[in-house]
Image (spheres, grey):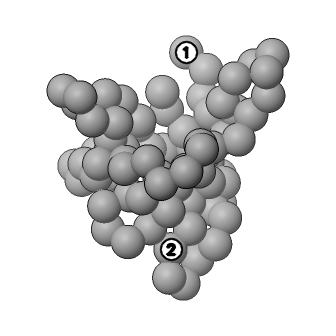
Amino acid sequence: GHYRSAELGMTYAVAMAHDTLTVMIRGDVMRPLIPVYRDAFEAGGGGTVWVTGDARRGVTAMHVGAARVWDIVFARRLP
């Protein structure tokens, strides 16, 4: 799906590429999302991605953290 950060003015795309979950950043940088614990992934460049949501709607947001940032929220964009 697609996830948008109003704070950064950016949209990330999450999709399967072969057998690997990936995130596309800036439309030209693809990073693998490696599971590290429930609903959380290492994002290939040292950052961490985790998702939140509820049982009724599923995943509603993706959160990104790295060395100098923590919890940048990307809201899920519905088709």
Is any part of residue 51 visible from this angle?
A: yes
Q: Nearer the viewer, mark 2 or mark 1?
A: 2
Q: Nearer the viewer, residue 72 or 43?
A: 43
- Residue 28, how many percent across, how many down? 22, 49
> Mark 1 and mark 2 in contact (Cβ < 8 Å)?
no
Tag 2's secondary structure?
loop
Neighbourhood count class around disc 1 (C-alpha, 10 Å): few under 14, some 14–19, many 20 upward: few
- Residue 23, how many percent across, how many down? 36, 44
Query: Disc 2 designates what residue?
Result: 66
Quarter of image, res 45: bottom left
Residue drawn at (28%, 52%), measured in percent from left and top? 31
Tag 1's secondary structure?
loop
Is any part of residue 5 visible from this angle?
A: no
Kind of residue sitting beneath label 2? Ala
**Is the residue 22 above or below the residue 64 in the image?**
above
- Residue 68, how many percent across, how many down? 54, 84
- Residue 25, how many percent across, how many down? 35, 51
Residue drawn at (37%, 48%), measured in percent from left and top? 33
Task: Single out the residue that lies furthest toward the bottom.
Answer: 68
Neighbourhood count class around disc 2 (C-alpha, 10 Å): few under 14, some 14–19, many 20 upward: some
Query: Disc 1 designates what residue?
Result: 79
How far is the residue under mark 2 from the one under mark 1? 28 Å
Q: Which quarter shows the C terminus?
A: top right
Residue drawn at (55%, 51%), measured in percent from left and top? 37
Count of labels in the image: 2
Quarter of image, res 62: top right
Kind of residue sitting beneath label 1? Pro
Residue drawn at (60%, 44%), measured in percent from left and top? 38
Q: Nearer the viewer, residue 75 or 54?
A: 54
